Amino acid sequence: MTRRWATTVLAAVGMLMAGLITATVTAAPAAAHGALMTPGSRTFLCWRDGLSQQGDIQPKNSACAGAVAQSGANSLYNWFSVLRSDGAGRTTGFIADGQLCSGGNPNFAGFDRTGNWPLTHLTSGASMNFTYNAWAAHPGWFYLYVTKDGWDPSQPLRWDEIESQPFASADHPPLAGSVGSVDAKYSWTANLPSGKSGRHVIYSVWKRSDSNETFYGCSDVTFDGGNGEVTGVGVVDNPPDPGAPANGACSASWAVTGSWNGGYQAEVTVRNPGTTTLSGWRVGWSIPSGTTINSVWNGTLTTDSLGTQATVSSVGWNGSIAPNTTRSFGLTANSSSSTAPPLTCSSP
């Protein structure tokens, strides 16, 4: 009886533990991960560019190196994570101009930079098999847009430089490969936009159908009669990236952390992308019409006499920023819009 009783107890405990494990797995939040692979997004091709035999991230391409200097190596280790959990498929009016390639995600702000990004060579109007990585797979829709003729690649991408309608889309395309690896991918065939020549950006949006999570990405291409060849990966390019960070410079990114009817709260992250420590910083922006800044913490706010320009300077304890590290300050404002303004950043 004792042995039988013990066996029964162990079986019951085993069933209970299995139930707890199942409950834990079921309750875990489901997060997708992925990026356009053909033609490759900036984060994907820069990850390929930076791989070394030791598995380190050491980009050779100057634009990729500049992005990592600004956003850190995690932006390449997590090349499949350019996402907004609250995206719900939104584009224009949701993500600010100049932040399209990062999806407005401050962890990938370095990929909004201009520079000599890796290029995929394509033929305008040709049929192409598009692939999108599914590191973590979830159902959804995929939309591909292209820049307008005459867009300016020397400036961060704006919405008015992208065609208003996608040239290709896919509704829950098939998945192949082993999920959790670079081999897992969604794929579909469509025609490339016709009448295009020279350098352009293909902008991708993956809208999940089982949550609001949405992924964004920029793929740099050139329509020169190519068949998908990629250049600028694994080589030191020349001339160097015109947007490469210099010592004494800083960058700033804006993220809304809360909003309510008629106002919002934001956090501004200041990064030192250089190789020497910064001693103090200043972040400036134009105050939109109808906006009033109520409070600022971890910084000192000054405004011009007209109330149209704002500057937040470091305070004594947070002025020093070591290379590739950040500081931050917060603010609240009364406004009908929480759209992030273009920021400037400098060190005294």
Image (cartoon, rainbow, N blue to C red):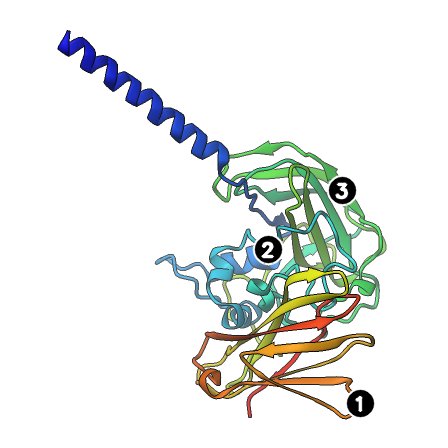
Question: What is the three-letter code of the residue carrying label 3?
Answer: Ser
Mark 1 Cα-neighbour bin, 10 Å: few <14, some 14–19, many ≥20:
few
Asked if labels 1 and 2 touch by Cβ distance under 8 angstroms, the answer is no
Question: In this figure, which residue is indicated by the disc labeled 3?
Answer: 169
Residue 274: x and y in percent read: 49, 81
x%, y% of residue 52?
40, 60
Which x, y percent locates residue 239? Answer: 59, 78
Residue under the point 74% across and 55% down: 225
Disc 2, SS: loop
Disc number lying in front (3 or 2): 2
Please state which amino acid type lies under the numbered disc 2: Val
Identify the mark nearer the N-term, 3 or 2. Answer: 2
Kindly give the residue lying farthest to the left in the view shown: 2
Occupied quadrant, residue 322? bottom left
Q: Is residue 175 above or below residue 248?
A: above
Counting residues from the N terminus, which is met first, the one under dot 1 or under dot 3?
3
- Quote the CA–CA distance across marks 1 and 3: 47 Å
Q: Is residue 136 above or below residue 314?
A: above
Q: Is residue 168 left or right of residue 231?
A: right
Count all numbered tags in the image, as a single digit. 3
Q: Residues within 10 Å of mark 3 (few under 14, many from 20)?
A: some
Instruction: Compare residues 336 and 199 and report the one nearer the observer.
Output: 336
Q: Does any portion of residue 338 appear in the rendered image?
A: no
Earlier-in-chain disc, 2 versus 1: 2
> In terms of secondary structure, where does tag 3 sit?
strand
Disc 1 residue type?
A: Leu
Q: What numbered label is drawn on residue 306?
A: 1
Kindly report the distance in space between the C-alpha atoms of the residues bearing marks 2 and 1.
38 Å
- Residue at image position (65%, 67%) is 265
Query: Taking 281 as reference, is 331 left or right?
Result: right
